[in-house]
Image (cartoon, helix red, strand yellow):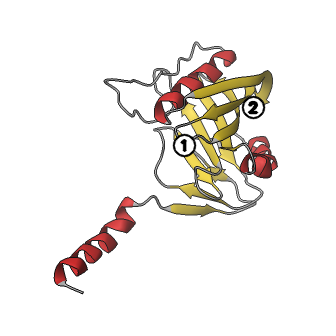
Amino acid sequence: MNWPTLSVIALALTLTPQTASAHRLMPAGEAAQVARSDMTVTPTIQWNKISQRPGERAERWTLDGELLNDVVFFGGVEDGAPLLREVNRRENPLPHFSSTMLPTDIAPLLESTLRITQNISSFDVSNVAPATFLDAAGVQFEYRMLGADDITRQGRAVASIIGGKLYMITYDAPAEYFYPRNLLDVERIVASARL
């Protein structure tokens, strides 16, 4: 092996740990504070927390990788803030949460956000219903989306606006196998949520 090749390999090895998203194990049965907020959840199985935050007040957990099962916690998104980190603020800005929104406005907010951040071509919302989340009146809804990878993902979200801030948990995964496989685990996370 020649020196230029060894130099490239050495450079790759030194950059990889710093540029890759690290995961932290979230143990079953232990309450965890999420999304830089006072919201806590207690998972019943082990999850992996992805260290790179998708937004200022957001946190992502997965079991098998975020493309296979993705739980996102939104902890106290403030008035005027987007749900996720801006992708291209100048040409395609994200919609912002408003503390005057009704619970039924949350599904379109999530849809618009995901269409921009994940390049979603099709997004259908269904089963919108009142729900209690964090001991407050809120909303629950399901969604199906199709992205650039041509994989249909099924999702569910539950949210409430408390003190003018948005709290929400979303779960989405490929509809065929992964979504139903861990839906009950996510429902238990939602039921355990406390503020």
Q: CA distance from mark 1 to mark 2?
A: 32 Å
For the residue labelled by badge 1, is the local secondary structure a helix, a strand or a loop? loop
Instruction: Indicate the quadrant where residue 163 lies.
Output: top right
Image position, residue 155 (x, y; %): 69, 37
Q: Is residue 14 above or below residue 128?
A: below
Q: Residue at x 35, y 30 (%)?
A: 88
Indicate which disc residue 122 carries. none
Image position, residue 134 (x, y; %): 73, 34
Q: Residues within 10 Å of mark 1 (few under 14, many from 20)?
A: few
Which quadrant is the C terminus positioned in? top right
How many numbered tags mark residues here? 2
Question: Does residue 83 appear left or right of residue 155 in this picture?
Answer: left
- Residue farthest to the front, as pictured: 150
Indicate which disc residue 149 carries. 1
For the residue labelled by badge 2, is the local secondary structure a helix, a strand or a loop? strand
Query: Which residue, given by chain and number where applicable, does mark 2 sit on?
Result: 133
Instruction: Indicate the quadrant where residue 145 lies.
Output: top right
Nearer the camera: disc 1 or disc 2: 1
Q: Is residue 44 above or below residue 58?
A: below
